Image (cartoon, rainbow, N blue to C red):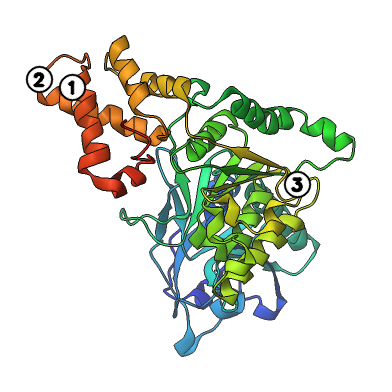
Amino acid sequence: MSKPDTKFAHALLRQHFSGVAPERIVTGVRTFPARMRADLHTAIETLFGDDDCVLALVGLHKRGWHETLDFPTLCEAGQHAIMVGPLQYEEVEIGEERPVRCLKNALWLLERDGLRHAMILSEAFDMMTHARETHIEIAALAGPDAEALASRYFAVLEDAVAKAGCYRGKVLSLESRRSYSGKASGILVHKLRSVGRDEIILPKSTLDVLERNVFEFFDRREALARLGMSVKKGLLFYGPPGTGKTHSIHYLASRLKDHTTLLVTAEQMGILSDYMSLARLLQPSILVIEDADLIARNRMQMGSVCEEVLLNQLLNEMDGLREDAEVLFILTTNRPETLETALASRPGRIDQAIEFPLPDAEGRRKLVELYARGLKVPAEVMATIIKRTDQVSASFIKELMRRAAQFRLARGADPKLEAVDIEQALDELLVSGGRLNAALLGADPEAAGS
């Protein structure tokens, strides 16, 4: 691969195409979402991994951030000439040990089977939608060989983006800002702790309904499709805060390694269509909308047209999926009574509501065993905890065990809990912290602690 002997793109292209007039050159163009650039650049490396076909690779300097560099732009001379220079890379996180290094604006001068051609990569910006894109253009002397070559290149790139190998099977959310590390995001990959079945402390009936509507449904999805039945599904998780709704979603994501999980927060509902595009691309997928009551509450309780627009967008997106779309919707709420009936009471949008109740005595015992970690809990202390924690959430018990451990360690004692550790922890959580602290941790101070 040689170094260019000119600082302008137009001169470099004229040398590469041996004086062929620009009007005899034809180009093919594809535009890809910028958030898929990690897969796109991985495919480009595959295409041009053989340096024999790459005569030169140079960076391109844009005149403005909104400009898209294409073949006619690069052919301009004079004061509008595009300068070439060092290659610029952007590191894109994909949740692996190393990020993917992606070129920003670049020009490849290529020759394959005697056919000289060029590829332009440019960051692009859609002025109508304000979306970042990646512009790819293949330029070659007009003719069937050029068309076949461009088609072959684009097929490789389109296949890589469709497979989305960098993100498939991961837990994702969309991110428009940069991380504090300075690396690009676009798609944020979450590293969730793996949650096993023994860590899901729910009533047996609740866990049975959950697994039947997820795991068993997925196991029979192909058979259902052959019968002509829909394979998309909607679930509603509801119950008081801290009862395991989000924890159970982590469990599902841990078990369904072949599914891509997309996490949507209420403030991101404005880009729901982008999430839906990803859900379709990465199916089988799970689309999780937490605190759905914030954007899907009853129309009579809405305070603005904007709120109704977001609700309608959610309903339209759920209705717009094809029946064969392998997408599972999971909506969570702490206030099911406030949900819009058009969402919560219509099969095809929500097919099953699953209640996550406050744990009963047996549930609280299992939660203490789960969150005790390295602590030893004698039978009499366990009995005290169960008695004193009526009407509390799983989150409350988790914090109770940590607080009790803190009091135990403050005395420099062994890890065997005593009643005094629990009494001090309960006092701080339910009494000293006030009613607000108890409510934040998912406890009814009048029922608990008695």
Instruction: Please name the amino acid that badge 2 sits on.
Output: Gly
Q: Which is nearer the eye, 194 or 405?
A: 405
Q: Which residue is mark 2?
A: 412
Query: Where residue 121 sits in the image (x, y, percent)?
Result: 55, 64
Of circles 3 and 2, which is in front? 2
Tell me which residue sits at (22%, 31%) in the image: 425
Which of pointers 3 and 2 lies earlier in the amino acid sequence? 3
Instruction: Please name the amino acid that badge 3 sits on.
Output: Ala
Of circles 1 and 3, which is in front? 1
Q: Give the class, few, some or many, for how many residues have Cα within 10 Å of label 2's Cα (few <14, many ≥20).
A: few
Asked if residue 1 lies left or right of residue 285, the reply is left
Query: Label 1 vs label 2: CA separation?
Result: 14 Å
- Give the numbered dot on residue 420: 1
The number of discs equals 3
Query: Where residue 92 sits in the image (x, y, percent)?
Result: 44, 52
Tell me which residue sits at (50%, 51%) in the image: 173
Q: Secondary structure at mark 3?
A: loop
Q: Which is nearer the eye, 26 or 221?
A: 221
Q: Which residue is mark 3?
A: 325
Tell me which residue sits at (31%, 20%) in the image: 384
Q: Secondary structure at mark 1?
A: helix
Q: Which is nearer the eye, 418 or 319?
A: 418
Instruction: Please name the amino acid that badge 1 sits on.
Output: Val
Q: Which is nearer the eye, 413 or 71?
A: 413
Q: Give the class, few, some or many, for how many residues have Cα within 10 Å of label 3's Cα (few <14, many ≥20).
A: some
